[in-house]
Image: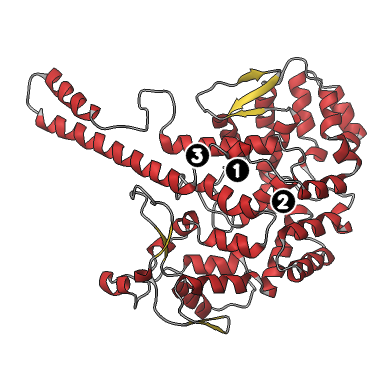
Amino acid sequence: MATLAADPRGALLAELERSRPAATFADLPASAQAARDISDFRAEEQARKKLAQRSQKENEGKDASATMADTASMRMAAVPTSGKPDSKEPPLPQRIFQDEAAARMDFAVNANVGFVERLVWFWSNHFCISADKDSAMVGAYEREAIRAHVLGRFGEMLAAVESHPAMLVYLDNVQSMGADSIAGITRDKGLNENLAREILELHTLGVRGGYTQTDVMSFAKVLTGWTWIDPSEPEHGGEFLFNKRLHEPDDEVVLGKTYADAGVEQGRAVLADLAQHPATAQHIAEKLARHFVADNPPPSLVAKLARTFKDTGGNLKELAKTLVTADEAWTPQRAKLKMPGEWLVGVLRLAQARVQVSNAAPDGRQGGAPWLNIGRVLNFQAVLGQPLWRPPAPNGFPDTEAAWIEGVPRRLDVANDFAAHLPGDVDPLELLELGLGPLASAETRQAVARAESRTQAFALLVMTPEYLRR
């Protein structure tokens, strides 16, 4: 922390060069495995429910209610279950989500610097999916498609994102088929434009990127056949699949260029060109500068980022270096209001808290540090208006002050709630130096020092203008 304060640019650049440990995520299942496990779980639950209904029907009108119970118990006992209905643990889908969330949150809280983790969060919001559509894969999707490529090339991340089953499910491409494809003809079903439209509008070119509705339709045809193997399949369920029977069999023109019908390679070729498009460079540069620097970022900074994107072929590490070294990123004015999730992680980091992987574990302390179960932390995020992995739309959570300023008072409730978990020997003035140091104004120092209680002092500290902004 002292190194970061003494040379913040150097600390951020050094973190970009260091390899990041992945031990936190080592025990979490791959997305396909999670999809298969939850498919099995739901099948088992359905079987148990049907057996119970069947037994009840068979025993209707009988006086011996014990016989009905015995019959149901014997039959249901024959059905294996991964849901552990007699335990206090949540059902499997919720448990997988909570394990992913706890690992992610604990990794962020304990990151040495945290800049690379912020990049992961930025790109995860840019290429967002929602747990409301499929909770099984949302955490693994972030690890596999975003985290694995966060310091690689944009084109590689784009290809990983758009072919990931979680994205294909979220934007309904698993249901899309060409009208002249084998499946389209036999099933009398057709095209879904969602994935193609969001790739062009949100993920690459941007709203003013120069594409037309005709481009959307053509690109949607290119992406037909990009689907997944049904999770009920025991070996490869939940994995990406290019299904030729769903694919529109024709050459397509996207943004004035003809792409020959080459199966899955047709879609990959379009994505590769979109990743190198000048409009993509501009769109990404604007979003990155807006997220990290100002709601209305300096045009000179956007130009620097766009130029780096073009010159390096979308090298995301070099893009991050340009952001860190640009003078425009280090203006004295702290112009950005922290988003709720970012502020919450800051609060947890300040208190040196840890997150319990199991929601069944109670809040408590270990080694003097406060431990919070993941259910409590997720509730905090939901109360603050930014529920984890549940964006309101495919364009992700908004990144400007206007979207979050009205919810700032709710942060005080969270701060007071959390302060109750702090160890009794915590000195708020020491936390002030740790969290703000020279950024703390005289008024802030005085307010924290004069607080009536340790809880009040902590809440005041994390609600100061210096702490709410960056």
The quarter of the displayed image where residue 461 is located: top right
Q: Are marks 2 and 1 in contact (CB under 8 Å)?
A: no
Helix, strand or loop under label 3: helix
Q: Is residue 364 above or below residue 121?
A: above
- Give the residue number, with chain letter if any, for mark 3: 97
Residue 396 or residue 88, whichever sits in front: 88
- Give the residue number, with chain letter if any, for mark 2: 401
- 215 left or right, relative to 82: right
Helix, strand or loop under label 2: helix
Which tag, 2 or 3, sits closer to the chain's start? 3
Which tag, 2 or 1, sits closer to the chain's start? 1
Look at 62% across and 78% down and name the residue there.
Answer: 210
In the image, which is nearer the foreground, mark 1 or mark 3? Answer: 3
Residue 116 or residue 127, whichever sits in front: 116
Residue 169 can be seen, yes or no: yes
- Give the residue number, with chain letter if any, for mark 1: 385
Q: Are marks 1 and 3 in contact (CB under 8 Å)?
A: no
The x and y percentages for residue 407 are 66, 42
The x and y percentages for residue 134 are 45, 48
Residue type at the position of mark 1: Gly
Residue 449 or residue 59, whichever sits in front: 59
The x and y percentages for residue 143 are 58, 48
- 198 left or right, relative to 324: left
Q: Is residue 39 above or below residue 55?
A: below
Residue type at the position of mark 2: Glu
In the image, which is nearer the foreground, mark 2 or mark 3? Answer: 3
